[in-house]
Image (tube, rainbow, N blue to C red):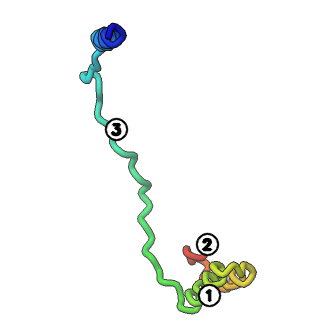
């Protein structure tokens, strides 16, 4: 039992000696950085032909037919170059 008493005494001594936190020096988080002033661009629906090529490309990709998938994705980009899902 002596070892347990020594351990308890050491814990009490450590708690008494450790510095208490000083919350008076804390400051709130700074405001978030303002985003750029460029207005967001509205989403434009790609042409149906480009969507069909993208769907076929995805089908080939999940079936590990990568050459065919790449050809379909390139065909979609030829029709609509700004297609985010294909990029």
Residue at 27% x, 19% y is 22
Marks 3 and 1, how far apart in space? 48 Å
Give coordinates of residue 82: x percent, y percent. 58, 76
Query: Is 46 in front, or is 5?
Result: 5
User: Rounded to the nearest whole Å, what is the CA distance between mark 1 and mark 2?
Assistant: 15 Å
Mark drawn on residue 71: none
- The residue wearing badge 2 is 87
Nearest the eye: 62 or 67:
62
The residue tagged 3 is 30
How many dots with numbers? 3
Q: Residue at x 24, y 22 (%)?
A: 24
Q: Quadrant of residue 13?
A: top left
Residue most toward the bottom?
A: 49
Q: Is residue 40 left or right of residue 86?
A: left
Residue at figure coordinates x 53%, y 91% from the top left: 48
Residue 19 relative to residue 83: left or right: left
Q: Position of residue 50 (x, y in %)?
A: 59, 87
Q: Secondary structure at mark 2?
A: loop
Is 40 on the left or on the right of 21, as rendered? right
- In which quarter of the view is residue 26 placed? top left
Mark 1 closeness class: few <14, some 14–19, many ≥20 residues within 10 Å: some
x and y percent of residue 49 in the render? Answer: 58, 92
Secondary structure beneath label 1: helix
Is the residue under label 1 in contact with that under label 3 (CB below 8 Å)? Answer: no
> Residue 56, labelled with which disc?
1
* Mark in the foreground, 1 or 2: 1
Q: Residue at x 66, y 83 (%)?
A: 60
- From this view, report whether residue 45 is shown above or below residue 28: below
Percent x, y for residue 78?
66, 84
Question: What quarter of the picture does the C terminus occupy?
Answer: bottom right
The residue mark sitting in front, 3 or 2, is 2
Q: If you read the primary sequence from the N terminus, does the residue marked by circle 3 or circle 1 appear first?
A: 3
């Amino acid at each position: 039992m002596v070892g347990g008493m020594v351990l308890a005494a050491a814990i009490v001594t450590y708690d008494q000696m450790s510095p208490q936190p000083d919350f008076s020096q804390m400051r709130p988080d700074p405001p978030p950085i303002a985003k750029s002033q460029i207005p967001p661009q509205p989403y434009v629906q790609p042409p149906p032909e480009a969507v069909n090529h993208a769907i076929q490309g995805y089908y080939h990709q999940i079936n590990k037919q990568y050459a065919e998938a790449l050809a379909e994705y390139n065909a979609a980009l030829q029709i609509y170059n700004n297609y985010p899902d294909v990029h």
